[in-house]
Each structure stands twice: as C-alpha cells, then as structure tokens.
Image: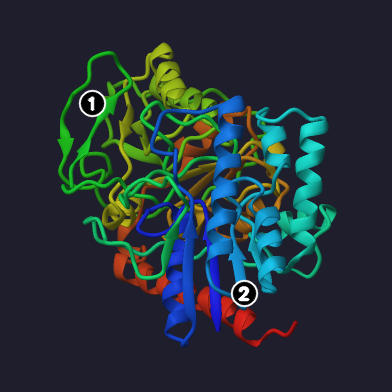
Amino acid sequence: MRILLINQFVPPDEAPTARLLGDLKEHLETLDCSVTLLGASAGYQGGAKTGLARLVRDAKAHVNLLWKGLRLGPFDWIVCLTDPPGLPFTSAILARVKRARLAHWAMDVYPQVAVKLGALPDGLPSRLVAAAMRFGYRSSHPLVALDEDMKQVLETCGGTRIQVQPPWPPLPTPNAVDLIPPNVERAAGSPSPIPSKQSEPFEASAKNGPSLSDTQALNVQHSTFNVQRSSPISTGAAAHSPLSTLHSPLSTSQSSPPISTGAAAHSPLPTLHSPLSTALPPRTWLYSGNLGRAHEYKDLLEAQRLLEASGAPWQLVFQGSGPCRNEAQALASQLGLKNCLWQPYAPSDQLLPSLLAADVLIASQKESLQGLLWPSKLALMTLTARPILWVGPTQGQIATDLASASPLNGLFSPGHPESIAHWLASLPPKDSANLPTQESIQSRAKHLRIQGLNLWASQLLHSQK
C-alpha cells in the first residue's frame, strides 16, 4: 500500500507533529507499506511573521505542498495533520486528483482557534476559511480528534465518523542531527534538513524564530541548562542535571488534599518567619514546553509572588520558549520575583528526567480554546504520577480526565492565583520512594505508542472505501 503523510514539519525536524508522523512512517513500513513524507518548513527559520506576512507565507506553503504532491506518484492513502492552517483543504484537493483516500488527524481546529486568539478577524475571512475546512473535514474518513471536546467541535464543523486518538507520549531521541530518512519530500525553497522549530497556530514566534512545542528539544550537544532568574542579576550558573538544584530531598508522604477548582475563598497564606534560603528545601513547580498565546501564565507568576511573600519554599521554573516568554519574563521582573527560573528546552533525552525532578507539573490553556487544542505535554506528564496543576477550562474533558486520574491534581479556572498558591502550600512533600521509575514510565510510553500506531495501521490497512 502506498501512503503519503503531509504536514508542515516532517523528520528530521523535532517538532512533536514531525515525531508523530516519523513514528507512523516507521511502523507502516514494517507492515510492507511504501510511505512518503511531504513537508513544507520553508520560511519558518526566519524571524516572527504576523498578519499579512504570515498569510502570504502559509499560502506559499500550500502552493508548494500541492505542487510537490501532484508531482509524486499515485497513493492509496493521504494522511494529513493541521499545519499549515487549512491543510485538510489542500490535502482533500490532492486526494481527489490522486484518487486516494484521505485521513485527517486534527491537532487543532481552524479557523476557530485563530479567531479566539485574535489572529484572524471574525468576518468574511474566517467564514471563507471555515468553508474550506468543511470541505476538508467532509472528505476525511477517518477524521481523528484529540479528545471528546474536539470531537464535538469537529461535528459542528461538518465532520462525520469522527474518532478520538490523542498523541502518544514522546520517547527519547538522540541529540545528534539525523540524516533525512528515505522518501522524504520537501516543498520548494525548504531549508537544509536541520531541526527547526514548531510554530503555533496563527501566532507570532519568538524573536529567535518559531517556538518549539512541548516535547521538542533544542539541537544541543551538551546536557547543561543555562538558568536565568527573573531578577535583574542572573546567576549565570548551569545546572549539570535536569533541575538538579531545584527539587527537594526525599520525604515521607502525607494525606492528600482535596482537588481545588479555584472558586473557593481561602484565608491568607501562612508566613514562614525564617527566610527562604534557610527555611525548608525549595520545591519546584515546572512549566515545560511552549509558552504561547494559547496558554495562561499570569496566574502562575502572581501565585509565585504570593508564595514568596509568605516565605513558602517554592520555585517556579519555565523550561522552554515561545511567543509569550519575553512578556512573562518582563512580568516576573515587574513583580520582583526572586525564585522564578528560566531554562531552555530540555534535550529530548533529558525531558523525562526534568519532569521527574519537579514536585508539580503545569499545563494551561485559555478557557475560550476548549475543544480547539489539546496540550501535547499532557501525554507524558500524566505518566509521571506527579501532581498536575491545570489552569484552564474546569468543565471540559481535560479537567475531567485529570480529576479522575489523581486526587492530588489541582484544577483551576484562570483568574485565581490565590487559590493556586494555597493549593501548592497544602501539597504534601514528594514521596519519591512510591513514584514510578523512569524505566517504568518509558515502558508505559512505549505501550501507548504501539497502541496508537496499531490503531492507525488498522484504519489505513483494513478500512474499505
């Protein structure tokens, strides 16, 4: 069987979506399928592009993908993801010309996400994009959503026979740059095959280029992290293992606090009379991954301010980058935070160790984006058995799943930093002796990966027209 996989990013790019398609290609080839990857990453290595420049760039990507796809041989299946925005429309045209079946794995929902983020006017332009996407959705069998909330949204957009398949957790990959795998086609004008960065839907990128996503690693060849503090004077010290100076020593478990929703009022935080440096060992709450406009960060910084004011031994760590990182750093300095640390993305082989070194892991999403996005960081975070702080919609599928997964997880709607601070202050110390090991987590991640790949293989190899 001949299969074409289309996405903005393809291997050897380390973007999460590229990793998913790379895994799928490798698996399908073990089943005697002929698989070709078609990507269009041209232009994403430059500076930030917004407005008309962003639209022109995406339009060029569509033209390049369509032209390159038309020049390729016949295919039985075309599988596309979401980026560049509107890709299901272009893929549906290509599928009709090639007389191929089309499958779409929706990583996000356009143009709704662009409208909610203020990147696309809610008028004629968005209606035209929505009409094009309806054509793509109705041409896709199967049409795959990331959770039940997204499935409901896609149903209102004209999608039928929608299935649910969240992304599988990432597995460690070597830091060295890989060669382009066989059967990889790139759109005209694409840069040389070095790891690039994942852009966000209709978002401006950081000044150093597009931001990476949650599971994406920097192309670094050393294992240190450059740590920056939010105070004007940086320590400049490098941590020689993930968060090695940040996590507290092993301690005994205490009773679990109830799940918080952010709605209840609390008494003022208790104040520790001794300074932080001589009080309890610092504990870490970690935001790892892309800090984009779809995510909440102001509540995190304000909660850290309250914790520092009370003398609570908590350090907030941002590990990654993204369009909002500079804004967040500026706000941290404005708030006078002394224990807010800024690190680059963890190399892929150090991502899991960095998560395991933290006491609390953070995921967030604007409430208006419920059903339009699914934070890919959750795929790995939920395997660590660490308490997860969720700042986002508290009535959606993500919150429901987190609430049922562990009583230690904290669920908060945006706008409740006081509740977040109280929840953190009430958490029992990490009981490392009873937490899963890195090896057991990797084993579980491999199982979920195989499970997801088998589902896709079953869809493509055994479904009928």
The image position of residue 432, as x and y in percent, is: 31, 58
Choose top left, top right, bottom left or bottom right for residue 367.
top right
The image position of residue 387, as x and y in percent, is: 47, 51
Label 1 and label 2: CA atoms lie apart by: 60 Å
Q: Callout 1, which amino acid? A: Ser
Choose top left, top right, bottom left or bottom right for residue 330.
top left
Camera-nearest residue between 313 and 318: 318
Residue at the (61%, 25%) spot, across then down: 51
SS state under label 1: helix
Q: Is residue 166 visible?
A: no
Among the two numbered marks 1 and 2 on one chain, the one whose residue lies closer to the N terminus: 2
Vertical side of 326 occupied by 102: above or below: below
- Crowding around mark 1 (Cα neighbors within 10 Å: few <14, some 14 to 19, many 20+) is few
The residue that label 1 is drawn on is 277
The residue that label 2 is drawn on is 77
Give residue 314's mark: none
Residue at the (54%, 22%) spot, across then down: 268
> In the figure, is residue 341 to the left or right of 291?
left
SS state under label 2: strand
The image position of residue 288, as x and y in percent, is: 40, 43
- Split into 4 quadrants, where in the image is the N terminus? bottom right
Q: Callout 2, which amino acid? A: Trp
Camera-nearest residue between 388 and 257: 388
Residue at the (67%, 36%) spot, across then down: 114
Camera-nearest residue between 373 and 102: 102
Vertical side of 234 occupied by 25: above or below: below
- Split into 4 quadrants, where in the image is the C terminus? bottom right
